[in-house]
Image (spheres, rainbow, N blue to C red):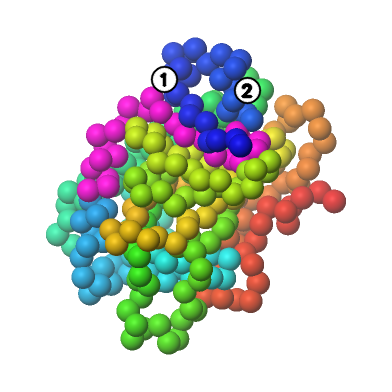
Amino acid sequence: MRSVPTIDLSDYRADDFEADHREILASACKDMGFFLLKGHGLDELISEVFAESKSFFSEAKEYKYRVRRDEDNPLGYFDRELTKRKRDQKEVFDFKAGGHQSKKAGRTTRWPENREVFRDCLTRFFESFTLLSEEVIEMIFVSMGMEKKDAKNLVVTSFGSKHSSAARLNYYPAIDPVPETERETIVPLGDMALHHHTDPGAITLLLQDDHGGLQAHSTSDGWMDVPPKEGTIVVNIGDVMQVWTNDQCKSGIHRVMPIESELGRYSTPFFYQPRYDAVIEPWSGGQEPAKYRSFLWQEFIRGRVADNFADYGVDDIQVDKYRVA
């Protein structure tokens, strides 16, 4: 059975990314859309993020509800998110940092009060993982046969300083996170901690603790574990990358199994996403005809997040909507 490979970023940084490295990475991106990344040099920051995440989620509901997100501002705390029209068994804190927050209609991060260290830590995380994402996505494009200079140019033009990336803290408790008195009017809890889906952006960099539970879908082997491995970051391919590479990369289908540990599970994804006005279409270096028509990232992401709060009776928008017949 295929396993999730580990890629050493330090090899790429040292221009020692040989043909066999590119082949392993390309194969993982095509089969499951997942790989583990080591050699990133951010272990100390990652430890800080987990400590702050655990501290925040340990607070009483009343405290967390003060920064509760809503349909007008999707940044903040939430405990009843839907995926594929099913309610997940998790709590989240969604945030952006620095100049990447939209001040339009008050869509700025609702930082909890009296947590200056928390805010500073997550701001440094956001900035560091932006830079890391630039390197990782460039490395993926190179493994797919793109020239390094062309990969750098695509990152600059499609992301740049105006990228729309987002991040979140996840906590998966062993019980329903919504108080029993508040469950009557919401969608019942589903059968997964996080239901199967793909991420809409380009790539996701995920920190996961040592409790496990994350699974990815392999084209050749079906559902398989993405095991925790010390010192690594989980990377999964998103819908945008699948379109850009004209299906050379597979948008990673993934889920989180029900949590059995009383301690719960913690994870932190960084969603690397293009600038809102970026045009998404297969890059011209491919040998096959384009399998997707072009579309605006802003149009796609709006359709993907619309049903996080309520079940509208249909699944959210997928990139197949733009597939050429």
For badge 1, the amino acid type reads Ser
Residue sitting at x 53%, y 26%: 139
Q: What is the quadrant of the N terminus in the image?
A: top right
Question: Residue 147, located in which quarter of the rendered image?
Answer: top right
Quarter of the view holding residue 60: bottom left
Label 1 or label 2, whichever comes before in sequence order: 1
Can you give x and y, in whole percent of width and height, for residue 176 in the image? 37, 72
| Front in this rendered view, residue 128 or 185 | 185
Which class describes the residues within 10 Å of circle 2: few (<14), some (14-19), or many (20+)? few
User: In the rendered structure, does residue 36 fall within the stretch colored magenta?
Assistant: yes
Could you say which is closer to the camera, residue 253 or residue 135? Answer: 253
Q: Position of residue 247 (x, y in %)?
A: 71, 39
Vertical order, 215 against 11 (above or below) = below
Residue 189 point in image, percent of width and height: 47, 74
Badge 1: how crowded within 10 Å, few (<14), some, or many (20+)? Answer: some
Mark in the foreground, 1 or 2 = 2
Q: Is residue 69 visible?
A: no
Q: Is residue 188 above or below residue 67?
A: below
Q: What residue type is disc 2 on?
A: Glu
- Disc 1: which residue: 10
Over which residues does the magenta segment extend?
28-51
SS class, disc 1:
helix
**Disc marking residue 263:** none
- Residue 310 at what x, y percent from top left? 52, 75
Q: Which residue is mark 2?
A: 23
Residue 116 makes an appearance in the image: yes
Residue at horizontal 53%, vertical 61%? 195
Disc 1 and disc 2: Cα gap in Å?
Answer: 17 Å
For numbered disc 2, what is the local secondary structure? Answer: helix
